[in-house]
Image (cartoon, rainbow, N blue to C red):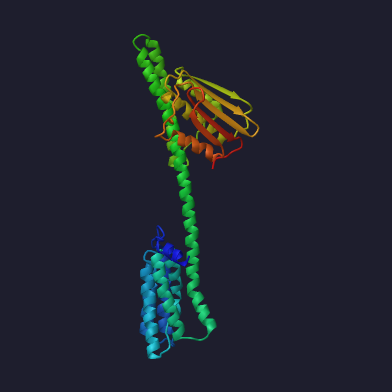
Amino acid sequence: MVRNAVRSLLAEPRAPDPPRRVWRDWVLVGGLLTAVVLEGILREDVVWRPVAVALAVATVCALLWRRTHPLAVVAAVFGALIVVNIAALISGDATFGLYSMICVVLLPYSLVRWGSGREILIGLAFILVALVLGIISDFTGYGEAAAGSMFLLFPATVGAAVRYWWSARLRELDQVRLREREQLARELHDTVAHHVSAIVIRAQAGRAVAATRPEAAVDALAIIEAEGTRTLAEMRTMVGVLRDDGTAALAPQPGVADLKRLARSVGDRPRVEVEVSGDLDDLGPAVGAAIYRIAQESITNAVRHARQATRIDVRLTSYDDSVRLTVRDDGAATSAPRNSLGYGLVGMTERATLLGGTFAAGPDADRGWSVDVVLPRTAVGR
C-alpha cells in the first residue's frame, strides 16, 4: 500500500497554470526586505549579522519564484539553512536568524501546492533535514520542538488540501466540458444529417422529374430552400450559444409539437405518418427535445438506408409515468446496424440514457427497422 502511494505520488505531475508574479508579490517582498534591513540594523542580539542578513535577503527575494520553481526555491533556502545549522553545531555557537525569516512558511505550501510529486518528495526531504538539524542545534524542549515542526509542516498540509480541492474542481469542469461537447456533437449530427438528407432527396426527386414535370422541380427547389434556411437558422443558434457573450438569443428547443414538421420535411417518398396519443402537455422540455431529436435521427436513417421503404410510422404514446416513441419502416430487412460507423445510434442511446430511459434499435420482426425508446415523463437533462 505504501509502495503504491509513493508510486502514485511520483507520477503526479505539476499543478497546471501556476500564477505569475503580481503586484501583491512585489508588495510582500518589499515589505519583508524593509523588515530585514531594519531588524539587521536595530537588533543587537543577532549572531553572525552579515550572514544572517544576507540569508534573509536571499530568502525574501526567492519568494518571487516560489510558485513557478517551487523545488529550486525550497532546495536553495533550506539547503542554506542546513549548511548554517551544521556550521553552528561544529562551532558550538548559538544559531542565528532574523524574525523576518518567518516567511519560509510560504515555501512548504508552494512546494506541495504547485510542485510535481517527485519535487514534493525531494523538497520535503530538504525541509525535514533542516528542521531536525535546527532542533538539535537549538534544543529548548520537546514542546518548542513540536511547535517548530508544526510551524513548517502545517503550511504543507494546507497546500495539499488546496491542491486536492482544486484538482477535484478541474476534474469536475472537465466532465462538464465533455458533456457539453457530447451534447453539441449530438445536436450538430442530428440537425445537419436530417436537413441535408432531406435536401439531397428533394434534389434527386427534382432532377428526376425536371424534364417531364417542371413545376414539380420548382416545388422541390422551394423545399430545398426552406430546409437550407432552417439548417442555417439552427446552426446560427448553436454558434451564438457557443460564443457565450451574453447577447445570443436562445431559441426554444424543438419538442413533440414539431414532430409533424419532420414528416413534411421528408416528403412522400417514403411517406411519414406521425401519430401522437395521450396527454403530453406537462412533458418536460428535456424529454420533449430528446423525443424530437431521436425521431428526427430515426427518420433520417430510414430515408437514407431503408431500401424499398414506402412508409415510416412514428408513434408517440403517453403513459402515467413515461412516454414511448416507436419509429418503424417497411424497408427491406437487414441484420447489420444502420449507420454503424457513424454517431446516430450512439447519440440516440446517449440521449435516452442521460434521461434515465431505455433505447433499443434493430431489425423489425416482420420487415424493416424499428426504434423503440421509453423515457420518464419528469426526467431532466444531466
Residue 74 seen by the camera: yes
Furthest residue to the left?
211
Considering only vertical position in the picture, is 98 above or below 337?
below
| Figure quadrant of residue 227 | top left
In the image: residue 145, left or right of residue 201: right
Q: Nearer the viewer, residue 341 or 207?
A: 341
Task: Tally the marks.
Answer: 0
Toward the right, the furthest residue is: 320
Q: Position of residue 236 (x, y in %)?
A: 43, 33
Quadrant in the picture for the C terminus:
top right
Residue at screen point 36% across, 79% down = 54
Q: Position of residue 31 (x, y in %)?
A: 43, 72
Q: Is residue 356 above or below residue 52?
A: above
Q: Nearer the viewer, residue 66 or 156?
A: 156
Residue sticking out furthest to the top:
212
Q: Residue 67's image quarter?
A: bottom left
Say which of 358 and 178 sits in front.
358
Q: Nearer the viewer, residue 337 or 31?
A: 337
Which residue is drawn at the image coordinates 36% and 66% (left, top)? 69
Q: From the viewer's perspective, is residue 370 above or below residue 36? A: above
Identify which residue is drawn at 44% across, 88% down.
Answer: 45
Residue 6: where, in percent of width, then height? 43, 66
Residue 94: image location, x then y, percent: 43, 88
Instruction: Say whether residue 244 is visible.
Output: no
